[in-house]
Amino acid sequence: EFHRRTRGVAVWIALTDVDHEKNGGSVYLVKGGPKTNCSGKSGHWSRRQTSLGALKDPACEEEVDSQKVVHSLRAGDAMIWHPWMPHKTQASSTERLSWYGRVLESDAVFCHNEYRAKACGRQALCNHGLQPGQKAHHVCFQQIHPLLPDEVAQRM
């Protein structure tokens, strides 16, 4: 999770066709998203607080579900949203492939670990060890341009 003033976007690219009505597997986004201040995943929702990190709030799940918007996508379609936009994956009856990443400014400040950012289950694991307030200069948060040789060496 990054500081609230960090400029950036989250990007989700469908690598296979996604029919949200037939098979599911899309991504729910929330109308009025960041204004809800909700973050998390099923059973682990919280509300962001400025200096307190995230405070557990199960009411967020109902709020997210009641305001969700979902679309079908073709392979290659991209969804782009603000990093604080509440979102969740729609259940899928078939296998679907996607790519997810965040694009942030080069001096993004790491804020705190939330449940969803702790890389578990089917999410990619990258132990970065960053502490709140540190700049996210780590191979887990790769710089796109200019390409940094030490990051390339760490991930190859």
Image (spheres, rainbow, N blue to C red):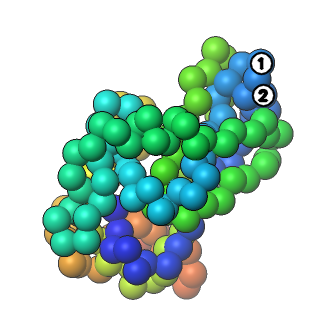
In this view of the protein, can residue 115 be seen by the observer? no
- Type of amino acid under label 2: Asp
The x and y percentages for residue 71 are 75, 39
- Type of amino acid under label 1: Lys
Question: Disc number at residue 19?
Answer: 2
User: For the residues marked 1 and 2, what is the alpha-carbon distance in whole angstroms?
Assistant: 5 Å
Residue in the picture at 66% in, 42% down: 69
Does residue 76 appear left or right of residue 108 in this picture? right
Pointers 1 and 2 in contact (C-beta within 8 Å): yes
Task: Report helix, strand or loop for mark 1.
Answer: loop
Task: Report helix, strand or loop for mark 2.
Answer: loop
Does residue 148 lie above or below 68 as drawn?
below
Does residue 21 appear left or right of residue 80 in this picture? right
Does residue 149 lie above or below 81 as drawn?
below
The x and y percentages for residue 41 are 39, 38
- Quarter of the figure that contains the C terminus: bottom left
Does residue 143 lie above or below 88 as drawn?
below
> Which one is nearer the viewer's eye here, 45 or 150?
45
The x and y percentages for residue 118 are 28, 47
Count of picture labels: 2
In this view of the protein, can residue 33 be seen by the observer? yes
- Quarter of the figure that contains the N terminus: bottom left
The x and y percentages for residue 117 are 33, 50
Q: Which residue is mark 1?
A: 22
